[in-house]
Image (cartoon, helix red, strand yellow):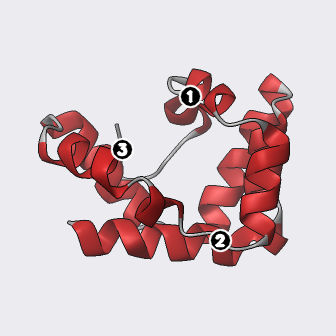
Amino acid sequence: MSDKLTCDDVMRYEHLASKVPAFLLGRMAKRNSNLVGKFESQIKPRLANMNDHHRHTLDVILNSDVSELQSVMGEVFEKTDKKQFKILADPKNAEFIESNLDEIRKLL
């Protein structure tokens, strides 16, 4: 993986998007919910057990501008038609993404 997130990088994990129903993700984004805080007990062990590749991927995501991440989410939506990616690509949800990325940064 390069130092920039690509559509192909996200496509490798697109099956995970289906775990959260689109209507629920939309509601959470609209409310700017702290998902990291809600799932911290599940996230912490995963962060501690990441291999080098996943750690690098996470670093790339955490160091990317939200607008870049949203652009990639828009590309993935066009390829998959999964509404979850459309929600994440919506500029109105930039604050939701940024605040949850900040919460992950705090855990690291």
Asked if residue 71 is positioned above or below residue 2 in the image, the reply reads: below
Secondary structure, mark 2, is: helix
Q: Position of residue 15 (x, y in %)?
A: 59, 21
Asked if residue 88 is positioned above or below residue 93 in the image, the reply reads: above
Residue 2: assigned label: 3
Secondary structure, mark 1, is: helix
Asked if residue 104 is positioned above or below residue 55 in the image, the reply reads: below
User: Within 10 angstroms of label 1, few (less than 14), some, or many (20 or more) residues?
Assistant: few
Secondary structure, mark 3, is: loop
Q: CA distance from mark 2 to mark 1?
A: 18 Å
Q: Position of residue 77 (x, y in %)?
A: 80, 36
Q: Who comes first in sequence, dot 2 or dot 1?
A: 1
Residue 61: assigned label: none
Dot 2 and dot 3 residues touching (CB under 8 Å) = no
In the image: residue 53, left or right of residue 79: left
Badge nearest the viewer, 2 or 3 = 2
Q: Residue at label 1?
A: 16
Q: Position of residue 47 (x, y in %)?
A: 22, 48
Q: Quadrant of the N terminus?
A: top left
In the image: residue 38, left or right of residue 19: left
Q: Who comes first in sequence, dot 2 or dot 3?
A: 3
Is residue 59 something that shows in the picture? yes
Considering depth in this image, is 29 or 38 the residue closer to the camera? Answer: 38
Q: Amino acid at mark 1?
A: Leu
Q: CA distance from mark 2 to mark 3?
A: 25 Å
Considering depth in this image, is 46 or 91 the residue closer to the camera? Answer: 46
Q: Position of residue 95 (x, y in %)?
A: 66, 78
User: Within 10 angstroms of label 2, few (less than 14), some, or many (20 or more) residues?
Assistant: many
At 85% from the left and 33% from the top, the residue drawn is: 78
Q: Amino acid at mark 3?
A: Ser
Q: Residue at label 2?
A: 96
